Amino acid sequence: MEKVAIIGVGVEGFRSAIRELSYKEMVYQAAVKAYDDAQINPREEVDTFISCEEDFNMGTSITDEYAPDQLGAAQRTVHTITGDGIQGMAAAYMQIKTGMFDVAVVEAQSRVSDILTHNQITNFAFDPLYNRQFDAVYHSTAALEKRAYLEYSGTSEEAIAEVAAKNYNNALKNPIAAYGVRAKASDIMNTDMIASPLRDGEISKPVDGAVVIVMASEKVVKEKNGNPIYINGISYATNSPNFDTRDWQYAKYAKLTADRVYKMAGINDPKEEIDVFEIDDTYAFKELQHLESLGVYDKGEAGKAMLNGDLGSKGSTPVNVSGGVLGVGNAHDVNGLQRIAELVDQLRGHAGRRQISDANTGMAFSWRGVPTTAGALAILSKE
Amino acid sequence: MKVRGTKLTSDEFHNKVIAVKHAPEIEYDWATGVAISKFLKGLKDGKIIGVYCDSCDRTVTPPRMFCEECFSPMSKYVDLPDTGIINTFSIAYIKTDASRVEKPQLPAVIDIDGTSISPSGFLHLLDEINPDDIKIGMKVKAVWKDAIDRTGAITDIKYFKKMEDA
Ligand SMILES: [Zn+2]
């Protein structure tokens, strides 16, 4: 079956606030880099453009109307996915697979600094009839989940603090990361309690940034003779939006997604067959919960692996060498593409001081954040 | 004819039927960026700024940092005259809340002189003119707020009016 590859990546950011550029200018900067990497002219060689953005985050209704110009997509085929960038890539993947499109561009952007009341927008995502009225700070929803996960898996608070410290330290080696810092687990444990059992040091902080990805059919890959990274599996899933019927202990959306993607990519044992892991860590415990729900580790084993050093950049299962969402910053719907950008760097051998040796296969998993149970997964490979 | 169903007053509908109300307090503060910052600063100074694309040989306003036609960066900013022609217009008798107004609002898209493609300009308002006399292609000129009242906003131009010598 014909393969689909990533042939270009461009990143602008990430910083806590990009105030000197408008959102269009920020996306333009990322797009120019992606097209240079792919060696394509967007005005002539791209067949379909997909922008991942949400009206409430952009502050404009029908915000997709404003997506084309900065992508080189004026008066071309463009549509928007109101979701994570990996969901956008899945749409692009399917379009290329139809045989009607050879080159697809996927873009995601975060402009949290343009929003003065981001908590209100997150609160707006809660069910309006019987959940939103409590006006709860949304981190407390993550705290409900963390407590259920700790109880269910027997994971220690120390292991979770080690995850946060690891990702902040990893970010120091990543030039696009906003929140790199030398940190020890004890530093994390000493941060303020935000909503028990969740501490401030375990919670990712917002950033502005944009990522543009160019994807292509095998036919174009052969013509371009560039540096392609193949997409061997990609999918997404949602559990339940209802607090009363969702699984709090483990991330069912991750399991549902992984079952499909492993089948598609022919993966039997992800821990053995995958070399680099970029796994959502919007809250530190989510990295461990996601690793277990994705079947990389058994229930309760991811925390132990963290304490053994297995999840470090020199460990057997390196997770979030980019710094993850904690270290790079929480770019919301860009988080998935930030992970894809890291995997492309790693698999091309371009990751500099973060390079994992003999990296042939990687997986990127994103979660859409509180209060969702939506995740998206992609497995990339050099072949 | 007898209308079927149960009549409800507005008070009954909004206050007696069980429903859930929520009014979000959502605020934004958009960074204007390189090109629109120059445009807004120009308005504060009483000028309309455009930008020129070398590869397409065209001038557009409001300016942008890149050309959406050829995707090249654009950085040749130019001062344009504060005159133009009416591309299209309307005579609007209602406001956004659907209430009727005594004096109609006169929205128009103005193609600014010195731009090299049509349309290139912006939405603004007309005034000092009898609505019956407005025509597409009519030459108009900006009427500015006093310098001290200008803030760097499109409303620093109060409206466009018919050019006397046209
Ligand atoms: Zn041009």
Image: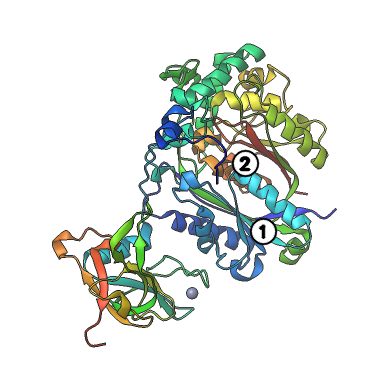
In this rendering, position of residue A293 left or right of residue B85:
right
Tag in front: 1 or 2: 1
Extreme residue in the bottom direction: B165
Q: Amino acid at mark 1?
A: Ala
Q: From this view, report whether residue A53 is shown above or below residue A308.
A: below
Question: Same subunit under labels 1 and 2?
Answer: yes
Q: Say which residue appears at 75% left-offset and 66% top-offset.
A: A223
**A130 and B101: which is toward the camera:** B101
- Under circle 1, the secondary element is strand
Q: How is the image coloured?
A: rainbow
Numbered marks: total: 2
Label 1, residues with CA under 10 Å away: few <14, some 14-19, many ≥20: many
The residue that mark 1 highlights is A104
Q: Quadrant of residue A334?
A: top right
Percent position of residue B142, x then y: 25, 73
Q: Is residue B61 above or below residue A368?
A: below
Name the residue carrying label 2: A355
Q: Report helix, strand or loop for mark 2.
A: loop
**Label drawn at residue B102:** none
| In the depicted structure, whether residue A122 falls above or below residue A80 | above
Task: Point out the residue furthest to the right here.
Answer: A1
Can residue B59 be seen from the camera position used here? Answer: yes
Q: Tell me which amino acid carries mark 2.
A: Gln
Is A105 in front, or is A302?
A105
Which chain hosts label 2? A
